[in-house]
Amino acid sequence: MNDLYCLIMAGGSGTRFWPASRRERPKQLLSVEAGRSLVQATLDRVPDEVGPERTIIVTNADQVAGLLEQVDLPRANVLAEPVGRDTAPCIGLAAALIEKRSPGAVMAVMAADHVIHPHERFKAAVLRAGHFAAEYDAIVTIGLKPDHPATGYGYVELGHEVEPGMHEVQSFKEKPDRATAEAFLARGGYLWNGGIFVWRAARILREIERSLPALAAGLKALAPALDGADLDVALQKVYPGLPKISIDHGVIEKAEGRYCLVADFEWDDVGSLAALARHNDRDAAGNVLLGEVLALDARGNIVDNRQRGLVALLGVEDLVVVRTGDAVLVARRGQEERVKEIVARLHEQSREDLL
């Protein structure tokens, strides 16, 4: 497609990856698998037809410098949010820029903190969704086949199949409780909503204007500065006043003409340090050991010591250990989600040096 753009959302803070993740070096700039950081891996799976000129990244202003060290994109394609306002303003801002540059263009929306394999299947899915969105002016989400009753994801209820693998969307479901998630899997016809969307930029702007008029007004106020040298100044003035809401709740759940393409690739939303165990090799005792680690009589541990120096384990099981230059995290496996509580406590203590 010669009018396809890709938006990569890379503004999260990744608090559950502390102490490796910091305000200026968040989760998406770290590597979960060997070699490439999460954002670099996301760029690797942007369809070849798009290229750097039509790839847009929206990130937090504090993270721009670190991001530019890792990506080879035009500086004008890296948009800096002065404050986080959730996904609807982020997507609206990118859509307005894309529509200004290329009226009628299609945009694919993806996050920078997913692990997806194989890349070629993902690229093919984005292109297929792009052609469908262009032909029918449709809103397309790429749904992921669930392999367990997850309660941390939203779900897509599939409707009529309009072509192989492409369904009308019956409904979007909020993050369910355990019993509801189990019922979804037992019933069938439900996929995880991974937040991967494809649509014409003009279509989502129309939906924003219909469902979120305050956001639409803010985007119109920013329009004269789009693609200009004074965009950052305009964002500082306008962006904090935009509504803080997700694109799902604010727009997509109220829209018509929604379709879901069933993904045929593997997908993982990298939410916590537990992801290190899913995407790295284990030793004979079930340990995941990154960096210089000596493990004696130790089983089922995750150690991230990609710093100079040694971490030694002796007679311990099921720990998560992360060592950086100025902090060490030691937690019981299964408690990874609670790492954000440490970050909250450090905020309370004004330990900005550790954030």
Image: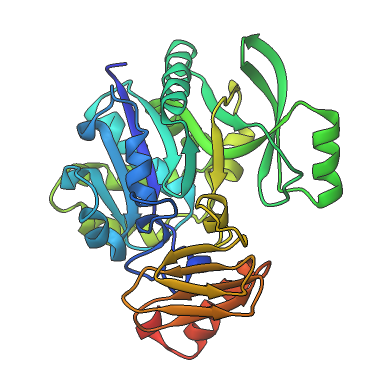
Q: Nearer the viewer, residue 290 or 148?
A: 290
Q: Is residue 308 left or right of residue 69?
A: right
Location of the C terminus by quadrant is: bottom left
Q: Nearer the viewer, residue 164 or 265?
A: 265
Q: Is residue 347 left or right of residue 167?
A: left
Q: Is residue 217 visible?
A: no
Residue 154 in the image, given as x and y percentages of width and height:
67, 43
Residue 125 in the image, given as x and y percentages of width and height:
48, 22
Coloration mode: rainbow
Image-quadrant location for residue 94: top left
Image-quadrant location for residue 259: top right
Residue 86 in the image, given as x and y percentages of width and height:
48, 54
Q: Is residue 264 visible?
A: yes
Residue located at (28% from left, 47% from top)? 222
Residue located at (43% from left, 14% from top)? 131
Residue 327 in the image, given as x and y percentages of width and height:
42, 83
Q: Is residue 176 left or right of residue 204?
A: right
Residue 311 vertical position relative to residue 47 in the rendered view, above or below: below
Direction bottom: furthest residue: 349
Location of the N terminus by quadrant is: top left
Q: Nearer the viewer, residue 65 or 323?
A: 323
Q: Is residue 285 left or right of residue 174?
A: left
Residue 222 vertical position relative to residue 338 in the rendered view, above or below: above
Direction left: furthest residue: 229
